[in-house]
C-alpha cells in the first residue's frame, strides 16, 4: 500500500471543518499563511489506524472551484495543485453539514467530479436529528459513489471510522479510479442533483422540519417572496406610528411638564433660558421619538433572530443584480438602516472592489435611524392622522414612501456608478441560510436596550453639545429693543447667508439654520428647530407650543415636503464621511460622496417643492 502523504478538508463555510480538523489532529497543528496571500493556512498531523501519519490541511470554506474571493481562490489552487512547489492533496475529505445537506452537496459534486480519492464526512448529524431530520449515510454513499462517514466532531464521534476511510480511499482510487462518480458540472444540474440526492437520503423527518422546507418554498419564491417582504415592511412602518403614538405623547407630556416646572421654579435669566429653551426644548424634542426607534428595531432584530433576514438578502439579490450589485451588498445596506457607519464597515465582506466601493457610496442613502425623528416630527405636523383603508394609516404610508425613495434612489445611483465610474460585471452571491427559530425574548430585550441606550447617549452627548452651542450662537450678541433676536445673533447671520442658496428650493432661514448643526448628526435638525423657535418665541405661550405645532404654523406643506426630500439624500453626518475616508484610504471618494449626495438632495428638494406648489398643496 502506498503511504498517504497529504489530505485536505474541504467544504462550504459553517460545515464544521475546523471542529473536525481540531478533533482529528489535536495539538499536532501549525498555522501559517499561504504564499503571496494573507489567508490563514492550518495544517496538522492525522494518525491513521495503522499508525501512519498524514499531513492534514484545513482549507478555507468555499462554494465552488471558480473563486469569487481570496479564500475560495486558495481552496481551488490547493485542490487543483496550482501552488508552486506544492502537490495537490492525495485525499480530499468533503465535510457536509447534515442539517443543510442539499446546499452543501452542490460543491461536493464539483469536488467529486475531479475523480480524486475522496471521502465524505457527514458532520453534525446530531444537530440534524435534534431538528427532526434522520439521514441514511449508505444511501448517500451509493448516490455519490464515495465513502460517507457520519461524524460529530465536537463529541469525537465517527473519527476512527473517518480515519479508516481516508486510508482506504487511496487504495480504492489506485485500484479503480473509475469508481468515482462523475456528476454534471453545470451549476443548475448540480443543484437539481443535490436536491434529488438529499431527498433520497432522508429516512425520516418531523413535521417541523418539513414545515421549514415549505416556508422556504414560499418565502424564497421569486414572485411571492418579494410581495411578502414588502408587506412585512409595510406592517413595520405602520406600527412605527400607530404603536408609538401613545408612548411618544407620554414622553412629550413629560418634557413639557419638565419645561414648565423649571420655568416656574427659576427667575427669568439667561441660565433659565439655556435650560428651558436650549437643553430641554432641544434634547427633549429628540428624546420623544425613542418609542419609534424601539419599535423599528424590534422588527429588525426579530427578523434577524428568526432567520428571515438572510432570506430577504436572497430575495434582494435579483433586484440588486439588475443594478450591477449582488446580494452580498444587501447586508451592509440593511445595516445602514440602523446607521451608515457599521454598514460601510460591513462592506469588508464584499470581495469585488468595485462592488464594495459602489456599496460604500450608496450606503448613506439608506434611511438610518437618525433620520426617523426628522421624518416623524414633519409627518406628524403636516400629514393627517387618518386611515386610507382598513388598518392602513396615511402617516405610515408616507414614512414607507420615504424609505422606498431612499432605496430606489440608491439603486438608480448604483446602476449609474456600475456603468461608469465602477464599471464591471456583478459578482456572484451565495450565502448560508440559518435555520428558522423563534426569537428569544431575552435576546430581543438586550438588543432593544442597547439600541435605546445608543440613541439616548447620542441625545446626551452629541445632541446636547450641539444644542448648547446653537443656543449660545442664537442668543449672542443680544438684540436691541424691538429687533428679532435670531436675526441679530451669530447663528442668524450664518443662516441668512445660507438661505440665499437654499431659498430656490423652498427653505426659509430657520430651515437653513437647522441644516448646519445637523452635519454632526441628522436628528440634531429636530433639536435645532426646537431651540430656534423657543429662542425666537414672542411670548411664553408661544414658546410652550410643541415643535409640531410651531412647524404647522410657520411652514407650508410644500416646504415641509421639500425638507423631507432633502433628508432622504443629504449626507448630514460627518462621522459617515470620516469612516468612508478610512475605508477608501483617502479623501477622493468621501468628497465625491458629499458632492453627489448634496446635489441629489438639492434637486430632490427643489423638484418636490415646486411640484407641490404647482399642485396647490
Image (cartoon, rainbow, N blue to C red):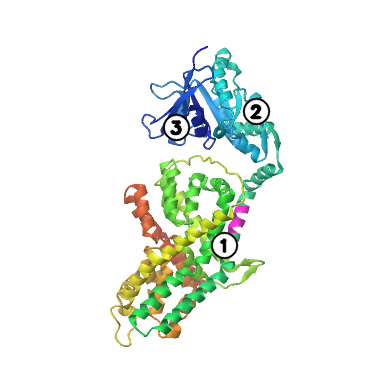
Q: Position of residue 425 (x, y in %)?
A: 46, 40
Query: What residue would you read off at disc 1?
Result: 237
| Front residue of 69 and 139 | 139
Whether pointer 2 and pointer 1 mark residues with C-beta atoms closer than 8 Å, the reply is no
The reply to whether residue 404 is visible in this rendering is no
Q: Nearer the viewer, mark 3 or mark 2?
A: 2
Region of the chain picked out in magenta, as a range:
228-234
Residue extending farthest to the left is 477
Instruction: Point out the frontmost of discs 2 and 1.
Output: 2
Give the residue number, with chain letter if any, for mark 2. Answer: 137
- Please name whichever residue, 434 or 479, is drawn nearer the observer in this view of the structure: 434
Q: Could you tell me residue 110's position as x and y percent? A: 55, 28
Count neighbours of disc 1 (C-alpha within 10 A) and say few if under 14, some if 14 to 19, many if 20 or more. Answer: many
Q: Which residue is mark 3?
A: 73
**Pick the front one: 426 or 581:** 581
Secondary structure type for disc 1: helix
Would you say 293 lies left or right of 265 here? right
Amino acid at each position: 500500500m502506498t503511504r498517504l502523504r497529504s489530505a485536505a478538508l474541504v467544504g462550504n463555510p459553517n460545515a464544521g471543518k475546523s471542529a473536525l480538523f481540531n478533533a482529528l489532529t489535536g495539538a499536532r497543528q501549525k498555522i501559517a499563511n499561504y504564499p503571496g496571500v494573507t489567508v490563514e493556512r492550518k495544517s496538522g498531523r492525522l494518525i491513521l489506524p495503522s499508525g501512519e501519519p498524514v499531513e492534514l490541511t484545513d482549507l478555507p470554506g468555499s462554494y465552488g472551484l471558480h473563486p469569487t474571493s481570496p479564500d475560495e481562490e486558495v481552496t481551488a489552487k490547493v485542490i487543483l495543485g496550482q501552488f508552486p512547489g506544492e502537490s495537490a492533496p492525495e485525499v480530499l475529505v468533503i465535510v457536509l453539514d447534515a442539517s443543510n445537506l442539499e446546499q452543501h452537496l452542490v460543491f461536493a459534486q464539483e469536488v467529486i467530479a475531479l475523480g480524486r480519492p475522496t471521502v465524505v464526512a457527514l458532520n453534525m448529524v446530531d444537530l440534524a436529528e435534534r431538528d427532526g431530520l434522520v439521514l441514511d449515510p449508505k444511501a448517500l454513499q451509493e448516490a455519490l459513489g464515495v465513502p460517507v462517514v457520519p461524524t460529530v466532531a465536537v463529541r469525537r464521534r465517527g473519527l476512527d471510522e473517518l480515519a479508516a476511510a481516508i486510508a482506504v480511499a487511496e487504495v480504492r482510487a489506485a485500484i479503480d479510479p473509475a469508481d468515482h462518480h462523475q456528476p454534471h458540472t453545470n451549476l443548475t444540474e448540480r443543484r437539481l442533483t443535490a436536491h434529488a440526492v438529499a431527498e433520497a437520503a432522508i429516512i425520516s423527518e418531523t413535521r417541523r422540519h418539513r414545515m421549514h422546507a415549505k416556508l422556504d418554498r414560499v418565502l424564497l419564491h421569486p414572485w411571492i417572496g418579494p410581495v411578502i417582504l414588502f408587506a412585512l415592511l409595510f406592517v413595520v412602518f405602520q406600527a412605527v406610528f400607530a404603536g408609538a403614538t401613545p408612548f411618544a405623547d407620554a414622553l412629550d407630556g413629560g418634557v413639557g411638564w419638565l419645561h414648565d416646572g423649571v420655568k416656574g421654579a427659576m427667575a427669568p435669566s439667561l441660565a433659565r433660558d439655556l435650560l428651558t429653551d436650549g437643553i430641554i426644548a432641544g434634547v427633549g424634542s429628540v428624546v420623544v421619538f425613542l418609542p419609534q426607534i424601539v419599535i423599528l428595531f424590534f422588527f429588525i432584530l426579530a427578523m434577524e433572530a428568526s432567520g428571515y433576514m438572510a432570506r430577504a438578502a436572497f430575495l434582494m439579490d435579483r433586484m440588486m443584480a439588475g443594478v450591477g450589485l449582488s446580494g452580498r451588498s444587501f447586508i451592509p445596506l440593511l445595516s445602514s438602516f440602523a446607521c451608515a457607519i457599521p454598514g460601510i464597515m460591513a462592506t469588508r465582506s464584499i470581495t469585488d472592489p468595485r462592488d464594495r466601493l459602489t456599496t460604500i457610496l450608496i450606503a448613506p442613502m439608506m434611511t438610518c435611524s437618525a433620520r426617523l425623528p426628522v421624518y416623524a416630527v414633519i409627518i406628524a405636523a403636516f400629514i393627517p392622522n387618518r386611515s386610507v383603508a382598513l388598518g392602513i394609516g396615511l402617516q405610515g404610508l408616507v414614512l414607507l414612501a420615504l424609505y422606498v425613495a431612499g432605496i430606489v434612489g440608491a439603486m438608480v445611483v448604483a446602476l449609474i456608478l456600475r456603468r461608469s465610474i465602477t464599471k464591471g460585471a456583478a459578482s456572484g452571491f451565495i450565502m448560508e441560510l440559518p435555520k428558522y427559530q423563534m426569537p428569544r425574548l431575552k435576546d430581543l430585550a438586550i438588543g432593544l436596550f442597547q439600541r435605546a441606550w445608543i440613541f439616548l447617549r447620542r441625545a446626551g452627548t452629541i445632541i446636547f453639545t450641539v444644542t448648547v452651542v446653537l443656543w449660545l450662537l442664537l442668543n449672542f450678541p443680544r438684540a436691541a429693543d424691538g429687533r428679532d433676536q435670531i436675526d441679530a445673533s451669530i447663528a442668524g447671520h450664518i443662516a441668512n447667508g445660507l438661505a440665499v442658496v437654499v431659498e430656490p428650493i423652498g427653505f426659509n432661514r430657520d430651515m437653513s439654520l437647522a441644516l448646519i448643526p445637523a452635519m454632526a448628526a441628522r436628528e440634531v435638525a429636530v433639536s435645532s428647530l426646537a431651540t430656534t423657535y423657543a429662542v425666537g418665541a414672542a411670548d411664553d405661550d408661544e414658546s410652550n407650543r410643541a415643535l409640531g405645532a410651531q412647524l404647522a404654523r410657520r411652514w407650508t406643506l410644500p416646504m415641509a415636503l421639500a425638507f423631507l426630500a432633502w433628508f432622504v439624500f443629504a449626507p448630514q453626518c460627518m462621522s459617515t464621511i470620516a469612516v468612508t475616508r478610512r475605508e477608501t484610504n483617502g479623501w477622493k471618494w468621501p468628497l465625491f460622496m458629499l458632492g453627489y449626495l448634496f446635489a441629489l438632495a438639492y434637486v430632490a428638494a427643489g423638484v418636490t417643492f415646486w411640484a407641490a406648489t404647482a399642485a396647490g398643496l
